[in-house]
Image: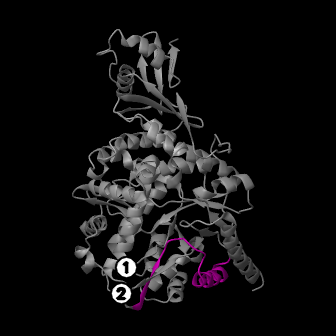
Amino acid sequence: MPSLFGPDLAALQADMARALLSGRYDGLAAAVQSGPITAEEALGVHRNTALHGLVNALRLDHPTVDALVGADFFDQAARAFIDAHPPTGAWLAGYGEAFADFLAGHGPAGELPYLADVARFDFALEQVGGAVSGLDGPALDLGAARLTLDGSLRLIALHYPAPAIRDAIREDEDRLADLDLRPCRHDLALWRLADGVGVRPIVPASAAFLAAVIAGQDPGDGLAEADLDALQSEVFAAPFVRLSLKT
Amino acid sequence: MSVHHFPRAFGLHAASSPASQRPIPAAAGIGLRLPHHAVVRDSRPAIPWLEVHPENYLTSALADELAAFADRYPISLHAVGLSLGSACGLDLEHLLRLRALERRIRPGLMSDHLSWSLATTNQGPLALPDLLPLPYTEEALTVVVANVDRAQGVLDRRLLIENPSTYLQFEASALSEAEFLAELVRATGCGVLLDINNIVVSALNQGLDPAYVLADYLAMIPPSAIGEIHLAGHAVRDLPGGRRIRIDDHGSRVGLEVWRLFETVAHVLGPRPTLIEWDTDIPELPILLGEAAVAQAILNTATWGQRHA
């Protein structure tokens, strides 16, 4: 995005944004008047405020991850994520989209192989919870009928039982020890209800079908005969789907 | 199927159609924050008006809640993310989100800060959740005028622009903050949100007398342009060499220096919409209401003084 207003202010702001994220202020000292507070001290206040805001935004979107790893570990992981994925927009609600994938490759999180999936589920719940309920989303023309998805529908594929982990953390942490945490694929559909978020497990064929509808692709490609039963029960009759006959 | 219920049980019935605009009275209101939603909803305290950060209400569920509060209280939207000082221009997507909320809530006042948070670098845009300071130069004035003009055009309403709390000054600054804001008012027709705590924080961090800085404000800015006043507490931290830094954390009661300057402002300007802001270490609601009661008492004195002058 080119500057519309000349190079000086744009350059100063670019330098300052980079310096605040990195904590290296050397290049800014000449631009700042000397006063009772040094440039480093003043810029340090802004860096702390910005980082606190970003870490807090990630924490709000990932409450189960925070509870599992503790505040110190979460802060450390979040700071590493911010370094790797600095924010690009003013609205922070969607900022943590890549946090789950980041955690999957974050060395210190290696002892908790399910952590990335817990982050993925946390984030999806928060995003769907913030969506508008009851709005129509993508649709599929079925000839005489039309299949319309709920606009808030979100699909995620997990390899660990993140919903059970989240429930245990929220209700009774001792239940964690009883959970079967061996890898096993879980496809989930999440959608907004009037007072919460609906979560329903679906088979991979249903997930592929719904993903194709959302992407505007032909969901019939690759669909096997055996998948039709699952579609009948999981998709066509699902509360996040509306089937209507054309008039 | 499982249902993950929202953590808070909201009994408010959201307004389905846009609220009618309710003007903000020249009285002491409070900043509404999430920890107080339930108690304000349930106890319906007699607060003249509420102010919120619209960026906290851009999701559907929270916008519903805010709409329900707007049915009962006059609401002011105090934005923190417009980045009116950005040389790269405004984030139009964000501006449109705020416009959608503004259309639904119909706030009595809408404001943001004389600051920036979005920059363009060689690696792409960078956005920092902070209110970053501007050099007070002709170039920066041109930038802010263009951005305020655009924001007011898209929102189709007048904005109030708040003086920021600052910890540094730029070598390039050629205007005082008050001169800069006065020029902005003249060029765009915007108003000013006078944050007295920010005047105290900035002045003391720069080794200036807050009363002197306030006098500059009252001399430079037309009284009719000052549409709202903010009051808040700030933290004081020790630095090496016996120095101190004031940090605008909105985490305590309004300080004595701020109350004294507020008395001056109230008597010079007369009653204006006045807000108690408290954003960190948020106390129980009665403490916040107690601070608002002090502010209201000062406003009442100002009213009496103006009537009997």
Give the secondary structure at mark 2.
loop
In the image: residue A92, left or right of residue B15:
left
Q: Position of residue B307 (x, y in %)?
A: 77, 80
In the image: residue B243, left or right of residue B290:
left
Give the secondary structure at mark 1.
loop
Label number found at residue B168: 1
Q: Position of residue B230 (x, y in %)?
A: 58, 72
Label number found at residue A80: none
Dot 2 crowding, Cα within 10 Å, few <14, some 14–19, many 20+ = few
Instruction: Please report, as a chain letter, where disc 1 is located.
Output: B
Label number found at residue A35: 2
Q: Is residue B10 magenta?
A: no
Q: Residue at x 61, y 60 (%)?
A: B32
In this view, the residue in front, A56 or B55, is A56
Q: Position of residue A148 (x, y in %)?
A: 47, 22
The residues colored magenta run B242-270
Instruction: Please report, as a chain letter, where disc 2 is located.
Output: A
In the image: residue B243, left or right of residue B200:
left
In this view, the residue in front, A191 or B240, is B240
Q: Residue at x 71, y 80 (%)?
A: B302
Q: Are marks 1 and 2 in contact (CB under 8 Å)?
A: yes
In the image: residue A139, left or right of residue A185:
right
Location of residue B137 (image quadrant): bottom left
In this view, the residue in front, B84 or A82, is A82
Q: Is residue A124 above or below residue B73?
A: above
Name the image quarter holding the C terminus of chain B.
bottom right
Q: CA distance from mark 1 to mark 2?
A: 8 Å
Q: Amino acid at mark 1?
A: Leu
Q: Is residue B250 magenta?
A: yes
How many numbered circles does the render carry?
Answer: 2
Q: Residue at x 35, y 29 (%)?
A: A184
